[in-house]
Image (spheres, rainbow, N blue to C red):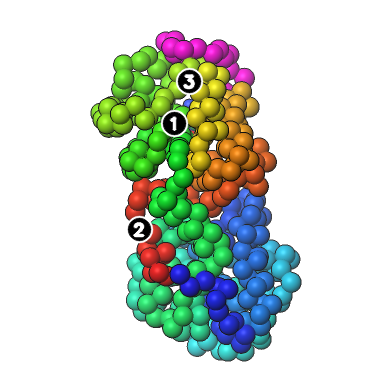
Amino acid sequence: MKTLSDLDLHGQRVLVRVDFNVPMDGDVIADDTRIRAALATVQTIADAGGKAILMSHFGRPKNGPDPKYSLRAAADRLAELIDAPVTFTTAAIGSDELVAEVDAQPNGSVLVLENTRFYPGEEQNDDALARQMAALADIYVNDAFGSAHRAHASTEGVVKHVKVAALGPLMEKEVRSLSALLDSPERPFVGIVGGAKVSDKIGVIENLLARCDAVLIGGAMAYTFLKALGHNVGASKVEDDKLDVAKALYDGAGGKLKLPVDHVVADRFAEDAATQIVDEIPEGWMALDIGPKTVDAYREIVVDAKTVVWNGPMGVFEMKPFARGTMAVAEALVDATKSGAMTVVGGGDSVAAVAEGGYEDALTHVSTGGGAMLEFLEGKTLPGVAALL
Ligand code: ADP
Ligand code: MG
């Protein structure tokens, strides 16, 4: 694996695929975490006297350039945060104008290109676009793990046409942490899978069952499993077309797959709903969190583990009365980490929950790649990573 730190960057045009796909609130950046995460990488290039050229996708523009999906706001925020001159350009990839701007770019400065998804060739992994991107670079660096599961021109195609390609620091940490999980986990190795749907995570559960000593299930998906095993699930969220799959996963797991034994149920889906804690879910009630007996049982398994990977909240953590299970699992991971376990969390909502609880720095690795991390845990090869190896 070639990484940024292996390279002499002075005077080099360093084309970096970053992840500036930030959530917006109107035309204001609602959360600049992804821009902040990229700061160290960009600063390293600028400080070494390289010319950083940044490209990223942003949102889902449908028909070419659309001001609503411009990266200008992200470039402005970067300029506020970083100690280097930042220029934003709308000059098109493949245009002489952009080549001239890059040629004129001073060492130690940063040029932010417009949204890669303004080009239809990006998602088609068009070879002509990939060549035009590569023509801007002496060195290509991919630091956008969250896009690594997509074979797009900016993540995969471009690599074929550059002389030097390397993993950026964020990408390197993701790949090292996640590879360690699947290649050489210290045991006991525990997987925790929760969240909205079984259907999203069948591949992850299968792959983890093959590798882990136990897989703990929570969140809405638990009720598809419980219904498949003949329990009453009341008005809980269930995927009726996945009952067979759930039953087969459970039966094939040889006791490794653990399900909640009690639940926080509500009479409706609301923060101020009436609630109770039950072992069997009554008719008309919906389970919105794992109960205290389940929390204790899962906690015991997690704190004894040497390796833990977690994706998917245990309940509707966005509502205070149903956040306890998710926060308790996060706390169990923190304690496991303190006793020397390697702990990895990923998934958009899971990471939001961990951040809300302030647990981020107390875990071994918090993955920024939602879909990419899930595909990795399914055992799939990520094209954006494979291209760099
Ligand atoms: P991630 O983004 O971490 O992969 P998911 O997107 O799969 O997680 O699932 C997160 C969502 O699942 C949250 O919005 C949460 O409210 C919801 N959820 C968790 N448990 C339940 C439940 N028991 N009933 C309904 N929704 C749930
Ligand atoms: Mg999600």
Residue 83, horizontal then vertical, whole percent = 74, 72
Residue 32, horizontal then vertical, whole percent = 65, 56
Region in magenta? 268-285
Kind of residue indicated by mark 3: Ala
Query: Quick one: label 1 or label 2, which is nearer the N terminus?
Result: 1
Above or below, 40 against 377 in this view is below
The residue tagged 1 is 216
Whether 270 is among the magenta residues is yes
Kind of residue indicated by mark 1: Leu
Closer to us: 78 or 300: 300
Q: Is residue 102 visible?
A: no
Query: Quick one: label 3 or label 2, which is nearer the N terminus?
Result: 3
Closer to us: 311 or 27: 311
Above or below, 79 against 294 in this view is below
Left or right of 104? Residue 370 is left
Instruction: Using the numbered discs, state the Cα–Cα distance from disc 1 to disc 2 in whole angstroms.
Output: 25 Å
Above or below, 140 against 263 in this view is below
Query: Quick one: label 1 or label 3, which is nearer the N terminus?
Result: 1
Residue 381 marker: 2
Residue at image point 63% right, 76% down: 45
Which-is-in-front pick, marks 1 and 3? 1
Above or below, 26 against 92 in this view is above
Whether 331 is among the magenta residues is no
Question: Looking at the rendering, in which quadrant would you find the N terminus?
Answer: bottom left
Residue 287 marker: 3
Residue 311, horizontal then vertical, whole percent = 48, 40
